[in-house]
Image (spheres, grey):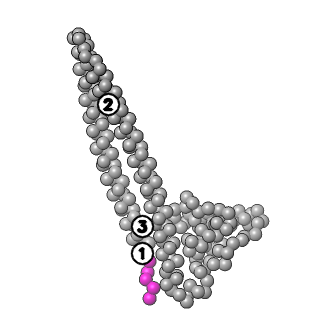
Amino acid sequence: MADVSGMSVRDMKEELASLGESASGCVERSEIEARLLSVRQRGRDQGAPQAGPAGGRQGGGGGGAAANPAASMAFALQGVFDSVGGSFNGVMNKLTTKFDDLDARLDGLEAKRQQVKDRIDSKQPTTPLGRLNQLKAEAGAAELREKLRETRKETYEGKKELAGKVQKESASMMQGMALPLPK
């Protein structure tokens, strides 16, 4: 009963649901296994009986799965797809957060640049000291524009780098999850 290695990911998730737990936040099979074992142990510690239809389905669907290899493969593929989908969602959430942070940073720089430009446009100095101050402000605006260009470049390079990482991770996950074909 304690061994979950023979169970499919779907069976483990169903058993977790029947025990009143959720598998959300678990991206990899090992995380789901750990959560299921933890919930089972907690149930034993509290003296609560284990319930649920998944307890008797540890063999991957019972005797019918051995007679139908296509069903076994379908269960295995579903588990792989669940795992890949969860991993992909985790990566995409990280990317979305990163892009939101970069966009907020760009918006802040753009607003600051506009403030400096408005300040420069609204004041036309009439004295040499005023003209000197205006030149200083224009130099600050030029520096700010340069920082904005650098930030945009970093954002673009960061997006390319993150996209490359996602592609590399998904390729390695798919390569690592290669299943043997039934004979």
Spatial CA span between label 1 and label 2:
52 Å
Q: Is residue 57 left or right of residue 159?
A: right
Q: Specify the quadrant of the image occupied by residue 154.
A: top left
| Quadrant of the snapshot with the N terminus | bottom right
- Image x and y of residue 23, in percent: 59, 63
Helix, strand or loop status at disc 1? loop
The residue sitting at 59% across, 68% down in the picture is 13
Image mark for residue 113: 2
Residue 10 showing in the rendered view = yes
| Circle 2 crowding by C-alpha within 10 Å: few under 14, some 14–19, many from 20 | many
Eyeballing the image, is 46 above or below 70? above
Identify the secondary structure beneath mark 3: helix
Q: Which residue is mark 3?
A: 173
In the image, is 30 to the left or to the right of 175?
right
Density class for disc 1 (Cα within 10 Å; few <14, some 14-19, many ≥20) is few
The residue that appears at 47% across and 70% down in the rendered structure is 81
Task: Answer yes or no: is residue 5 visible.
Answer: no
Q: Hey, what amino acid is under mark 2?
A: Arg
Residue 132 sits above or below residue 103 on the image: above
Span shown in magenta: 178-183
- Provide residue 11's location: percent of width, then percent of height: 59, 73
Which label number is shown at residue 178?
1
